[in-house]
Image (cartoon, grey):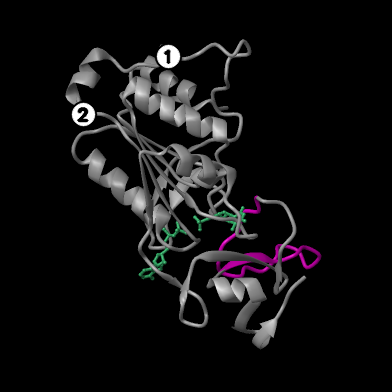
Amino acid sequence: MTPRAPADGATLLSVVPAAGDRRRHPAPAHLRFFHGPMDCGKSTLALQVDHNHSRQGRRGLLLTQGDRSARPQISSRVGLCREALEVDAGTDLRLLVRDHWAAGHRVDYLIVDEAQFLTAGQVDQLAELVDESHVDVYAFGLTTDFRARLFPGTQRLLEVADDVQRIQVEVLCWCGLPGLLNARVVDGEMVREGETVVVADTAPTPAPDERDTEVHYQVLCRRHHVLGQLGPTAAGPGQLALR
Ligand SMILES: Nc1ncnc2c1ncn2[C@@H]1O[C@H](COP(=O)(O)OP(=O)(O)O)[C@@H](O)[C@H]1O
Ligand SMILES: Cc1cn([C@H]2C[C@H](O)[C@@H](COP(=O)(O)O)O2)c(=O)[nH]c1=O
């Protein structure tokens, strides 16, 4: 169970760290957003940022939502993995931090992976934690969904973050050009309709049951995303597979 907003919608400006914690880190806090397509190293960077802060004695909370591993953790394809708190659209992120303070734990920073899935309101809660409670927030998320449209959380982060960086590691389309867009592939065909959120990997994985559909994602350059061309696959070279 994660903390929910109070029913009366009371503001939570009382979410403040102990005075001693504020003195330890007097510099202004920041909301930083790192974004890119799938497979560009967002989770790896999230764990690196956490590592660098924690080895300087800072205390952080790792948050995620729908990690590919289907577990409450931040997992990178490079092999790093850390336990994290699972949040959902109903989680009040200010209360979550306040509860940790109330339990006597410092929270100097937050690492938020899969930040594209946050609601706009939750991004505003993160901004409030930065501005009113001096917590540094590092958010990592997809730029666009499988239709090449901004996710709601991403849109709000682009609007309000202090610092926005597109991750520089290039993911390549099958044609060799940098890939910035995510294609959703269902039973071997690229689709443009469906739920915004479908958790899956970039590697095809057999469906658990033969009646189930197999879903994975493939990063494409803009031209091949527009054309719906998945390139040479098991189904044949350069197929035009659009549903
Ligand atoms: N075996 C490997 N050796 C080196 N780098 C790898 C390996 N496997 C994955 N990677 C790197 O990890 C990246 C994916 O990192 P990850 O943090 O899981 O991405 P994201 O969270 O953005 O989906 C790949 O783009 C690649 O650069
Ligand atoms: C494009 C797109 C992706 N998703 C899901 C698929 C994965 O579970 C995550 C992204 O994971 P990664 O750490 O960036 O590899 O998001 C989705 O639900 N909807 C989409 O349109």
Which residue matches tag 2?
Answer: 27
Q: Quadrant of ligand 1?
A: bottom left
Q: Earlier in the sequence, mark 1 or mark 2?
A: 1
Q: Position of residue 5 (x, y in %)?
A: 57, 19
Is residue 21 highlighted in magenta? Answer: no
The quadrant where residue 8 appears: top right
Instruction: Count residues near mark 1 (Cα–Cα under 10 Å), then give few for <14, some for 14-19, many for 20+.
Output: few
Quadrant including the N terminus = top right
Which element type, helix, strand or loop, lies under badge 1?
A: loop
Instruction: Count residues near mark 2 (Cα–Cα under 10 Å), then give few for <14, some for 14-19, many for 20+.
Output: few
Q: Position of residue 155 (x, y in %)?
A: 53, 44
The quadrant where residue 41 appears: bottom left
Beta carbon at label 2 within 8 Å of ligand 1: no
Which element type, helix, strand or loop, lies under badge 2?
A: loop
Q: Which residues are magenta?
A: 197-218
- Left or right of residue 109: residue 214: right
Closer-to-camera residue (110/157):
157
The vertical placement of 147 against 21, above or below, is below
Q: Look at 56% across and 35% down and name the residue there.
A: 120
Question: Type of residue at label 2?
Answer: Ala
Q: Residue furthest bottom?
A: 237
Q: Position of residue 109 (x, y in %)?
A: 33, 33
The quadrant where residue 25 appears: top left
Which residue matches tag 1?
Answer: 13
Name the magenta segment's main secondary structure: loop
Q: Give the number of callouts.
A: 2
The vertical placement of 93 against 212, above or below, is above
